[in-house]
Amino acid sequence: MTQAEDKKPRPDEARSTYDPEITSEFAIPAGLEVSRGGGEPETTSEFAVPSGLQTRQPPAAEAEGSAFSLPSTYSAQDAPAAFTPATGVPAVSLIKDAPWQDRMRTMLRMPVTERPAPEPVQRADEGGPAIPRVLDLTLRIGELLLAGGEGAEDVEAAMFAVCRSYGLDRCEPNVTFTLLSISHQPSLVDDPVTASRTVRRRGTDYTRLAAVFRLVDDLTDAETHVSLEEAYRRLAEIRRNRHPYPGWALTLASGLLAGAASVLVGGDVLVFVAAALGAMLGDRLAWLCAGRGLPEFYQFTVAAMPPAAIGVAFALAHVGVAGSAVVTGGLFALLPGRALVAGVQDGLTGFYITASARLLEVMYFFVGIVTGVLIVLYFGVKVGGQLNPDAALIVSQRPVVQIVASMLLSLTFAVLLQQERSTVVWVTLNGGVAWSVYGAMHVAGRISPVASTAVAAGLVGLFGQLLSRYRFASALPYTTAAIGPLLPGSATYFGLLNMAQNQVDKGLVSLANAASLAMAIAIGVNLGSEISRLTLRIGSAGKRRAAKRTRGF
């Protein structure tokens, strides 16, 4: 070895002299053999499959499945044992003979994953309807029901029934006071289809409401087979149908209603005629305001003035006529009992937004009535009218006359609600039963008027639900008019009279009593309906069978 080669450094010496990484504790020690990969990228994910683990790869031509397809690593031979939760698997148990309202309401209260799926109901040559058209038909039916005063839960049940009758599963209807919406999602991986509709006009027409219920009942019937085009045609006919009673009949009915209400609080024949004239004049003034486009608040204000003015005129003339009975009768024809019952029912069933809106509407109507009556009473007191707030304590007991008057009141109320002629007789009898129970408990039994009103309203709701199930119709035509004799017209009037005479404390107490009676009516009607649904499984009148288009019934 030459001297130059002897002075040449070895490789390890050269590395320690020139390589700066020798100072790192992660440097590879000299003499350690480390195999280096041939350009393979370094794996940084903790979810990567280890190199030594063999997995079954899906075929290359297999497309990506949906969320409901089996995993690629699943094997029927090596399937894991079935697992049952400790609380058990909830069973879907629905009554076959129950009306569609009860079946749809039961499924609406279920989670989406536990609802029984609908069976295919379309004919083979139809190929199934378009989803947007089914949703549009559903919204139009819901609009007519909500505008007619139906409760929010019953509207949702009807919309749900229409969707399921055409085979649409996983539908979610949503109802508020002015907005209807529905969403349909075919599966977890498909985009949902959502549609909405705004309810801008409201009108009381229970004949149209009953026709819509018959349409929904036919759609849910397994033997009817109503096509989508036929459903649209029938819905158009329902919209075009005229009211069953002319305008003069409605005005006459409002007068008779006020006269019958005045008899209930102790009026005679002269009071009956005066209350009827005042109510008919107020009704015509309200129609005039409606024709000019004024809101309903002003219509109620104007309609409340003529009966109050006639009562004040009797007080000024000193003719010995109970002017308070005249004013009370006029108020009976204006009190929004329908909206009150619907609002409380929505609150009891969990639709708090719709209930708040309905009760706010009732408050506006009530304030309009209060404004009209207070204006007349204030001027009547100023000019020397002697109106006695304690006259409510002197009411003659005439059971037969009052029962007849209560039945006349229910009959005229049914006409004002535009009910079918076939339902008028039943609701008239229901109103007579309501007043008989109230009189027996309050007058004969000396029971609190609030408790007596609640029991009587509960029977009205129970009988109304039975009649609606027997005729496959809505319960509103059989209950709303029947609660007319129970409305707190006298308590409202005497509260307003006390306030007009600067007796605010007594007035507030009387108005609070009126509010308590109104709540007792609404809660009693709802409780009677719920009791009938829970205990009485009546769903067939021998005319048709209940729907059987869903599995598990």
Image (spheres, rainbow, N blue to C red):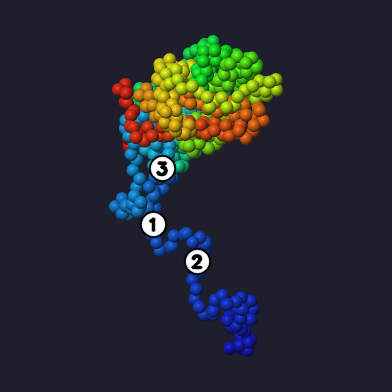
User: In the rendering, at what x and y percent does residue 476 appear?
Assistant: 45, 25
The residue pinned by badge 2 equals: 37
Circle 3 — which element? Answer: helix
**Left or right: 72, with 330 as reference point:** left
Frontmost of labels 2 and 1 is 1
Quadrant in the rendering for residue 455: top left
In the picture, the quarter occupied by the C terminus is: top left
The residue pinned by badge 1 equals: 55
- In the image shown, does 428 or 53 lie closer to the viewer? 428
User: In the rendering, at what x and y percent does residue 428 appear?
Assistant: 42, 19
- In the image shown, does 480 or 256 lie closer to the viewer? 256
User: In the rendering, at what x and y percent does residue 523 appear?
Assistant: 47, 34
In the picture, the quarter occupied by the N terminus is: bottom right
Mark 2 to mark 1 CA distance (whole Å)? 23 Å
The residue pinned by badge 3 equals: 113
Residue at the location (44% across, 32% down)?
Answer: 446
Q: Would you place residue 40 above or below residue 351 in this image? A: below
Mark 2 vs 1: CB contact within 8 A: no
Packing grade of label 1 (10 A; few <14, some 14-19, many >=20) is: few
Circle 2 — which element? Answer: loop
- In the image shown, does 548 or 391 lie closer to the viewer? 391
Quadrant in the rendering for residue 27: bottom right
**Left or right: 103, with 493 as reference point:** left
At label 2, which amino acid type do we have?
Gly
